[in-house]
Amino acid sequence: MLALFRAASGLIAGGDRLVAELGLTSSRWQVLGTIVAAERPQPVAWLARDMGANRQNVQRVVNDLVREGFVEMAPNPHHRRASLVMLTDQGRDAFDRAMALEAPWMNRLTSGVKVEDIAAMQRVLAALRAHLDAETSGADSG
């Protein structure tokens, strides 16, 4: 577990350095990516759920993104108080530029790692996430 924590911390710090010139942090980049991956604009609570993150933390990042012009809030026809988070053109551009930086960075980080090992890591991380989600929802994780 400590190795996983250390790798996650290293990825966050490296991501922060990678996208700093774009006005982003790893947290901002992750929120933008979650917005992009959604089929339609969502409220902060749904974004947080999709990220597996705390709603208050995501709200703080969204507030920063609004201030910087990367996202904007729009009325939600289904819920008066839960505005929808929408990507601006500036936000889309920043996200696209971050993703263009990400590919060569990941290639450097995974240099020498077998494709089969990366696939195995993806399966293990997916299983861990599923078990964590089950624990969080109160279901029996086995």
Image (cartoon, helix red, strand yellow):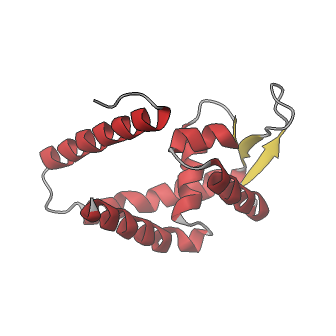
Q: Percent x, y for residue 7?
A: 31, 64
Identity of the residue drawn at 41% across and 32% down? 134
Quarter of the image where the C terminus is located? top left
Query: On the rendered structure, is 54 left or right of 63?
Result: left
Relative to 108, say whether 38 is above or below.
above
Q: Quadrant of residue 107?
A: bottom left
Q: Percent x, y for residue 55?
A: 64, 48
Identity of the residue drawn at 42% across and 28% down? 139
Q: Nearer the viewer, residue 24 or 9?
A: 9
Q: Quadrant of residue 39?
A: top right
Q: Quadrant of residue 80?
A: top right
Identity of the residue drawn at 59% across and 50% down? 54
Query: On the rendered structure, is 53 left or right of 14?
Result: right
Q: Percent x, y for residue 98?
A: 51, 60
Q: Nearer the viewer, residue 2 or 68?
A: 2
Relative to 11, say whether 122 is above or below.
above
Query: On the rendered structure, is 66 left or right of 118?
Result: right
Q: Percent x, y for residue 133?
A: 43, 36
Identity of the residue drawn at 71% across and 51% down? 89
Residue pushed farthest top?
Answer: 78
Q: How many numbered circles does the render carry?
A: 0
Relative to 42, say whether 33 is above or below.
below
Quarter of the image where the N terminus is located? bottom left
